[in-house]
Image (tube, rainbow, N blue to C red):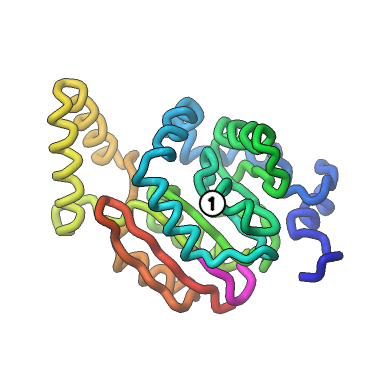
Amino acid sequence: MRKDEPLPWQNIAASDPAVSPAPPACPPRTRTSDRHRLFWRRSKGWDAHVRDLEQLADTPGFLRLRQEIIALARLNPDDRALDIGAGTGLLTLAAAPQVRHVCALDISLAMCRHLEATLVRDAITNVDVVAGEATDLPLADGSVEVVLSNYCFHHLSDADKRRALNEVGRVLRPGGYLVIGDMMFRVGIADARGRAVIAHFAGKMLRRGPMGVVRLLKNGLRVLSGRGEHPAGVDWWRRALEDAGFAEVAVRTLDHEGGIAFARWNG
């Protein structure tokens, strides 16, 4: 993209009379059309757990995962990046010094406000925060070189994961990279890795005593009612990425419940 070309989210803003084009902003932060769609995290109460997520993002495990994701992304100074499920900014804040611009997307308005406050505090000026969904990205076609995501996709059903991957392919430029960190196992007794992950979690909760037992029961009820997480395994991710048109697909598990998926967009 030439230096004098408008950013893709400026084009979107210019086409919407309700939005004033304030370059180089992403689409409007609290568009009315976005509000009715903020459901998959709101139902889990993420707006009430901003501080908890920030503390989790500061743990050694998540910091190591961030390091791996950023390294795989092969960021360049001219890149425009999209962080899907940005949360409190684990990936966004690490990517911002290395790229031209970051669009940080999250479905929780509270997360968005928290991240915006952090950007102001740290005088980071090349990031715009957008309230929106992974399955309906508010960016123009071929508008970013890199898409990042960390621990977002397991909140989506398999069908919505595929919709989100199609959206990622739409907004990526040919040759652009996608790097996803997420839970990577199947909930159920048929999957060996899933059994091991669940057994480890159950043992951890039981060692916490009555409060751990309560949490274990709550999680079990959520899964049985269909309101729990929907992590997918390595084989599913490999097939889904290839089906969506990605190349150079590489998916691997980590030494916990998580894994990393890397792919290049064929375009």
> Is residue 90 located in the magenta-colored stretch of the structure?
no
The residue positioned 52% from the left and 40% from the top of the image is: 87
Amino acid on which the number 1 mark rests in the picture: Ile
Q: Is residue 111 left or right of residue 121?
A: left
Please, is residue 251 above or below residue 70 in the view?
A: below
Q: How would you classify the magenta stretch by its main secondary structure?
A: strand
Query: As drawn, is 45 to the left or to the right of 4?
Result: left
**In front of the other: 11 or 178:** 178
Is residue 75 shown above or below 133? below
Residue at mark 1: 84
- What's the magenta region? 172-178
Q: Nearer the viewer, residue 194 or 261?
A: 261
**Residue 175 painted magenta:** yes
Q: Position of residue 177 (x, y in %)?
A: 54, 68
Classify the position of the C terminus by image quarter: bottom right
At x 20%, y 32%, the residue is 216
- Residue 54: horizontal and vertical position, in percent? 46, 34
